[in-house]
Image (spheres, coloured by chain):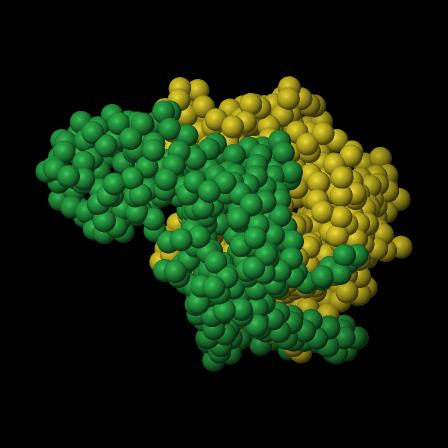
Amino acid sequence: MASTVIPANQTLAPTPKLNYLNNGHTLKSWLLTTDHKRIALLYLISVTVFFFLGGFFAMLIRLELLTPQGDLMQADTYNKVFTMHGMIMVFFFLIPVVPAVLGNFLVPLMIGAKDLAFPRINLLSWYLYITAGTLFLHCMLTGGVDTGWTFYTPYSTVGSNTNVIEAGLAVFIAGFSSIFTGLNFIVTIHRMRAPGLTWDRLPLFIWANYATSLIMILGTPVIAITVVLVAVERLFHLGIFDPRLGGDPLLFQHLFWFYSHPAVYIMILPSMGVISELIACFARKRIFGYKFVALSSLAIAVFGFLVWAHHMFVAGISLYAAMIFSFLSFSVGVPSAVKVFNWTATLYKSSISYATPMLYAFGFIGLFTIGGLTGLMLATIGIDVHVTDTYFVVAHFHYVMVGGVLMGYLGGLHFWWPKISGRMYPESWAKLSALLVFVGFNLTFFPQFILGYVGMPRRYWQYPPEFQVLNVLSTAGSSVLAVGYLLPMIYLLWSLKYGPIAEANPWGAAGLEWQTTSPPPTFNFDETPVVTWEAYNYDEIPAPKQLEAPGAR
Amino acid sequence: MSKFLPLWPDQASTMASQVDALYIYLLLVSGVMTALIYIAVTVLAIKYRRVPGRDAQQIEGSTLLEITWSIVPLFVMMTFFIWGAVIYFQERTPPADATEVYVVAKQWMWKIEHMEGQREINQLHVPTGQNIKLIMTSQDVIHSFFVPAFRIKQDVLPGRYTTLWFKATQPGRYHLFCAEYCGTNHSGMGGDIVVMEPQDYAQWMAGGPSAPLQETGKQLFTQLGCATCHRFDVQGRGPNLTAVYNKPVLLEDGRTVIADENYVRESILNPTAKIVSGFKPVMPTFQGIVSDEQLNALVAYVKSLAQPPTGTAGLQNQPPTSPAQPQNTQVQ
């Protein structure tokens, strides 16, 4: 393995070699860049801003729910706060976070390409995202929106007198950002793989992003059309969803969930891809059942389009439609379970290091298992009737979307941080925060399963007093979770200046991205690599001497 | 249910114990699965921790294992599916002998109309041991009728009826929640389901007004001029409504529909949507003329027309529930 060893005492010019970070220092060189790695960093900064904004709203929700009375804010304010929390986290954080940050940075590097297929469209994606985000912030500051992130009609078309159209427009524009990213990934993965990098040699992260991209380009146009229809009904009173105008309110739910259920897989699939990379590296093994793990991503993407009406079991759909959608919903359970079993089996006869990214991978398996199994409970119609629209559902989707996606994202961010920044993060702080995230998460969301089964509906500003103890537990957990999320931001920023210089391949990891320098040069590889090995050839790569991050204190 | 830290909801309907039994089964299976995975990961992570001089052994995978851990969970999931579907089928199939209660939801209250004419707001009194079918609609946006102690929930939509049924088993006062977000006071749109012993219920019911819902409907039928076209003696310009409820109706375009509550309602609000074969689309819409409560009364009247109405007495469907009725056998 070629690795550039740089003396640690050089602080002013850490690497004499030109890399993507020091290749141009002006604002213009960042804002007009077509380098996928710089665009990934632009995304990293912007999704982080939205994450903490969404997190701020989450804390307001948890504070309001400390007491049964609605006493911290007005009911209308609370309704806007949970709507903002949901919309920001779904459309401006969870959907872009792994593909647009880690995917953008890694897809070309992992397949040995110089950049994505359409670098300018990639930049356009970010600008669309920022336009949508700015519009949403404007919407928020000029009164906000109170429809819930689901925009259910006819409340959103005739009931609400908030800025629904502006919020819808923001979602519409953000959707195009997502479509362009998906398109870029698909073309890049098809056309720009290094010589010898056949489909069955691709890293599982690439397979996961490929499956995600398919959902992005097939599903996102539907949500775009749907919010346009909401706007049309609001503006021109054209009867589409409002029965008083001759429309059908359930039509909206069908269209909305046709995208928004697969959107959950847009969020979770890339994180699953990250987990495969992490487990392979820190167990120093090829992923058990590589082909099945790769194909399960595609299976999830395909089946994900066939299950949307499981959000509508009590909405007024026919008895038999409900049964068919229940049956189909279980079909997504199989490929998801296959992944978990294969990750677990990979640990057998492996050589495991407990570095921070691996802790996040363990955390992912732990939280996703609970999220997935409670998903099966929700697919079981007799149970869903009782717990849908309660905190049981809230807990379930946070286990999958936050427990799953964020564990994968943070694990991946730590794993590739040396590649992204050229610096190592402080290992003991990182371990502490991984532990805080896992404990805080369970303390926040596990009580909500009980709360939901006991009967507390979601989106409640005030609640009967007997639900208070569980709500207090949840709020207490959320403060631990908040610390767990704030810590990485602090020490990762710290590491940019004070972290030990990273080698090209500090983890002894397989994958083409580790064969170039840390950070990589603008065009990634000095020479196009030629691949003659299978993915995860850990038997051919020596493990790093230290068990954990080199230079960690 | 503990008022300090409730871990399990009250069981107050025949459905509650069934849903709980399935839930316990799911908890057990999920608990075992979670434990297996947690233990496997923990044991493997400790046993195969990195020690100098011991390398990982590369294992490609095993198709047999992959098939096993796809098929076995699938079979287990199918038990979830079938059991859940059986319960759901019951929840969605109201018994024929159910007493009907009309529910109108609006931002932010529940308006209840009993067939006997008794009206309530944010409260529903029901006797134990009797099947109750709610016929629900909304005046504005979507709401959802949720009674955790009964383990039932049904969205309530504007512009159509949805139904829900239950049989209460335990006297008491239980939460009624709106479970579909409906605007400012969504969390305040609740109330109580008051379950009473049949004799207490009869006493409560006797204290209210005595004009049954179908009587109100009959008066409206005359007042709004419906009777001039929908005649019971000779063929009028509209179909004779005698005994049409829940029967198939042949439409002008050749389709056949069942004249259920939703069809009667649609025919009042949007008469030209489904024209009965042999009739002209001459009926004006009553959208905006009749309120949801009046609609309910009209629907109740049409449903009561098993035979042509005679004289002034009209035809009553069933007398109000009395404790003497045989279906009032107490469960449990």
Which quadrant would residue B302 be assigned to in this image? top left
Horizontal side of A503 relative to B25 (left or right) equals right
User: In the depicted view, which residue is nearer to us: B58 or B182?
Assistant: B182
User: In the depicted view, which residue is nearer to us: A270 or A422?
Assistant: A270
The residue under the point 41% across, 43% down is B212
The residue under the point 36% across, 60% down is B96
The residue under the point 41% across, 30% down is B291
List x then y, in percent, for residue B39.
70, 75
Q: Is residue A127 visible?
A: no
Task: Tell me which chain appears green.
Answer: B
User: In the depicted view, which residue is nearer to us: B133 or A358?
Assistant: B133
Tell me if residue B26 comes above or below residue A248 in the rendering.
below
The residue under the point 62% across, 74% down is B28
Horizontal side of B132 relative to A469 (left or right) equals left
Tell me if residue A480 comes above or below residue A293 in the rendering.
above
List x then y, in percent, for residue B297.
38, 38
Q: Quadrant of the N terminus of chain A?
A: bottom right
List x then y, in percent, for residue A306.
40, 54
List x then y, in percent, for residue A315.
45, 47
Q: Quadrant of the C terminus of chain A?
A: bottom right
Horizontal side of A40 relative to B102 (left or right) equals right
Q: Colour of chain A?
A: yellow
Q: Is residue B213 visible?
A: yes
